Image (spheres, rainbow, N blue to C red):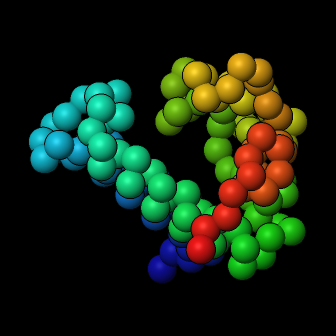
């Protein structure tokens, strides 16, 4: 029997739910992954994933917003292959910002470029 840590379980759950949403927006399970932002439901989907992630972080904020709260590489599905993400890894968030941030600046919703909480 395999043991799944809380960290891995949450990551796996978020990964599966996020990808499922991207591929099924608009009612077509074969949709193009990159077209999903054209569907208004995409924003509700991502808002909920963000809220679940935020709640999970609050359960152990010091650990889950620090180095132990990061898992994976710097590229989507490690394609192309890249190094493991660290708190110092640069993150380009595209059109959402005009500058590049370190991962440490993006780990909390109330610090860095963000300023929001969920109620």
The location of residue 117, given as percent across then percent down, is 67, 64
- Of residues 34 and 63, the one nearer the viewer is 34
Q: Is residue 27 above or below residue 33?
A: below
Quadrant in the picture for residue 33: top left
- Of residues 13 and 96, the one nearer the viewer is 96
Which residue appears at 65% of the width and 37% of the height? 73
Q: Is residue 14 above or below residue 6?
A: above
Identify the image quadrant of the C terminus.
bottom right
Report the number of numbered marks: 0
The location of residue 85, given as percent across then percent down, is 74, 39
- Of residues 109 and 115, the one nearer the viewer is 115
Q: Is residue 81 left or right of residue 59?
A: left
Quadrant in the picture for residue 16: bottom left
Q: Is residue 83 left or right of residue 18?
A: right
Which residue appears at 64% of the width and 72% of the height? 56
The location of residue 44, given as percent across then percent down, is 38, 54
Q: Is residue 40 left or right of residue 110?
A: left
Q: Is residue 56 above or below residue 14?
A: below
Q: Is residue 18 above or below residue 94?
A: below
Whether residue 81 appears in this view of the structure is no
The location of residue 22, given as percent across then percent down, is 32, 43
Which residue appears at 73% of the width and 47% of the height? 114
Q: Residue lying farthest left? A: 28
Whether residue 94 appears in this view of the structure is yes
Which residue appears at 74% of the width and 52% of the height? 115
């Amino acid at each position: 029997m395999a043991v799944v840590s809380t960290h891995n379980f949450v990551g796996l759950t978020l990964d599966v739910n996020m990808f499922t949403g991207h591929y099924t927006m608009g009612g077509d399970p074969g949709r193009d992954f990159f077209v999903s932002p054209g569907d208004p439901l995409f924003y509700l989907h991502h808002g909920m994933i963000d809220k679940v992630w935020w709640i999970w972080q609050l359960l152990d904020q010091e650990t889950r917003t620090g180095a132990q709260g990061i898992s994976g590489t710097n590229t989507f599905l490690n394609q192309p292959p890249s190094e493991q993400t660290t708190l110092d890894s640069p993150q380009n968030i595209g059109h959402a910002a005009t500058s590049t941030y370190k991962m440490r600046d993006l780990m909390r919703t109330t610090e860095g470029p963000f300023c929001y909480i969920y109620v």
